[in-house]
Image (cartoon, rainbow, N blue to C red):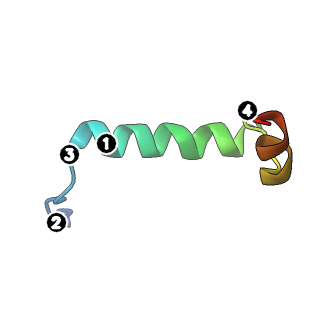
Amino acid sequence: MLEEPESPYNPEFVAKIKNAEKEIEDGETFLLETDSIWESMK
């Protein structure tokens, strides 16, 4: 059995990234247009 090398990253951080990737795959995200963000700040 091959062992995975120890990650230099914090396990909580890795879990957040994996959760975000799953949300993207499941379509649970949305795209914000940067122009509309700046317009709403005027």
Lateral position of residue 26 relative to residue 40, left or right:
left
Q: Amino acid at mark 1?
A: Phe
> What's the CA distance linking mark 3 and mark 1?
5 Å
Query: In terms of sequence position, does the residue under pointer 1 or pointer 2 come before the other?
Result: 2
Residue most extreme to the front: 42
Q: Amino acid at mark 2?
A: Pro
Lateral position of residue 20 relative to residue 7, left or right:
right
- Pointer 1 residue: 13
**Residue at point 20%, 67% (across, down):** 2
Locate residue 1, reporting x and y percent: 19, 63
Crowding near the residue tagged with mark 2, few <14, some 14–19, many ≥20 C-alpha atoms within 10 Å: few
Query: In terms of sequence position, does the residue under pointer 2 or pointer 4 come before the other?
Result: 2
Crowding near the residue tagged with mark 1, few <14, some 14–19, many ≥20 C-alpha atoms within 10 Å: few
- Pointer 3 residue: 10
> Do tag 3 and tag 1 residues touch (Cβ < 8 Å)?
yes
> What's the CA distance linking mark 1 and mark 2?
17 Å
Nearest to viewer (mark 1 / mark 2): 1
- Pointer 4 residue: 28
**Residue at point 17%, 63% (across, down):** 3
Q: Amino acid at mark 3?
A: Asn
- Pointer 2 residue: 5
